[in-house]
Structure formats: structure tokens, C-alpha cells
Amino acid sequence: MIYEPITKGDIYVRRFIYRFLLVVCICPILMYFPQVANAQSTVIRNLKSGFWKGAVKANAQGQASYCYLLGQKSNEEFNIQLYWNRKGFHVLIYSKNWSLIEGEEFQGRVKIDRKFNELVDASVFDSESIDYLFGHNNKAIDAFQSGSRITMEGPAGERTFQLNGTRKAIDVLVDCADEYLAPDEEPDMAQEE
């Protein structure tokens, strides 16, 4: 077989073809990544109250979506996250040992000392966490602020937690909600996670 020498023009044509193929094949993939990055919520501002640490999170459009504080206690099987979105006040309980059915909805009994004892709408947020919605129930929020112990029932059984520092933590969340969250819009938590 006889090979013809490669000319400078051939090199330019090949570079053009390679670049064209690169653009056609790679650009759609690269265009997907910003959507994936935007699906993650971004921090607008950090929040802190004693050992409770959290942030104001934004949705993909850059609007504040929820405020949260996570109880930062080491060597515990469970974590508690307090958060406030446009639906109101929530308590999310997390355990890495749970294998729950995501999306399951139920009413769980919540007891806070002798101040609050009611069924609360709740759902399994993911396989390792349960979300209890207190909404704008002032009785529950007041009990949570002044209580010392909470017992929550759900698909993973009954769990009791000490309520240390919750008065100030809820004050921080209420201030955050007043500053960042418009009460008339529904949050889209699916975009946050």
C-alpha cells in the first residue's frame, strides 16, 4: 500500500473534524452538569445557636427555600434537624441504622413533657429520616421551646430526645423564616436534595 504524505491542509481538516465531533458529543454532556449542580441547594447564609448549626438554603432559582439547624452531638445514633420552610416548622429525625420506605406518610404521636401530646402529620423523607410537620402550630412550637424532653412515634418505633437549646434555636429559625421566606409560596424540597 502506498501512503501519500499528509499535507498541512489534511491536518487542518482532521482538526476541524475532531473538534466538530468533540463539540457534538461532549457539549450535551457538559450542558447537563449545570442542571445537576443547580439541583443541589446552595447556602445563602450560615446559622448557629449553641451546638445547633445550619444554614439558609436556596433552591435552583436562587430563592431562599428553607432554614435549618442540625443538633451537632457526637457519638449519638440519632440526629435531630429543626427546619422551617413555607409550610412551617419541621423536626427531622435521622438514623443511619434505619431502612425506611421513602415517601410513606403517617400520623405520629408527639409528646413534649406534659405540654403537648398530639398526632402530627409526618412522612419518611428518605430511608434514614422521618420528617414531622408541626406547621404553624403555636402550641407545639411553644412546647418545643420550653420543653425538656420530646417523645416521637413513627415507623421506626418510639424515640425520646432531650431538648437542649431549642428555645434559642427556634428563635433563630423564626427570625430566618421572617427574613427569607415568603409565606404564600410552596417549597420544592425535591430540588433541594
Image: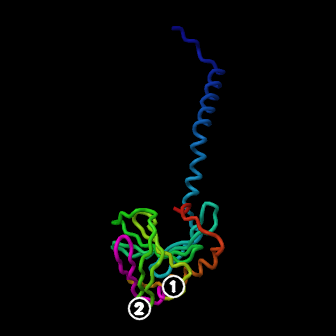
Residue occupying the point 50% across, 73% down: 54
Residue occupying the point 59% across, 52% down: 34
Q: Nearer the viewer, residue 189 or 133?
A: 133
Q: Is residue 163 above or below residue 8?
A: below
Q: Secondary structure at mark 1?
A: helix
Image quadrant in which you'd find residue 57: bottom right
Q: Earlier in the sequence, mark 1 or mark 2?
A: 2
10 Å neighbourhood of mark 2: few (<14), some, or many (≥20)? few
* Residue hosting label 2: 114
Which numbered dot is residue 141?
1
Kind of residue sitting beneath label 2: Arg
Q: Nearer the viewer, residue 84 or 71?
A: 84
Tell me if 7 is positioned left or right of 54 in this view: right
Tell me if 158 is positioned left or right of 2 in this view: left
Residue 132 rendering spot, x and y as whole percentages: 47, 75
Q: Is residue 73 above or below residue 124?
A: below
Residue 68 rendering spot, x and y as whole percentages: 52, 73
Residue 124 rendering spot, x and y as whole percentages: 44, 67
Q: Secondary structure at mark 2?
A: loop
Q: Is residue 184 magenta?
A: no
Residue occupying the point 38% across, 77% down: 153
Residue occupying the point 39% across, 65% down: 128
Q: How is the protein colored in the picture?
A: rainbow
Kind of residue sitting beneath label 1: Ile
Q: Mark 1 against mark 2, which lies toward the viewer?
A: 2
Tell me if 163 is positioned left or right of 169 in this view: left
Spatial CA distance of label 1 from label 2 is 14 Å
Q: Which residues are magenta?
A: 143-161
Residue 25 rendering spot, x and y as whole percentages: 58, 36
10 Å neighbourhood of mark 1: few (<14), some, or many (≥20)? some
Which numbered dot is residue 186?
none
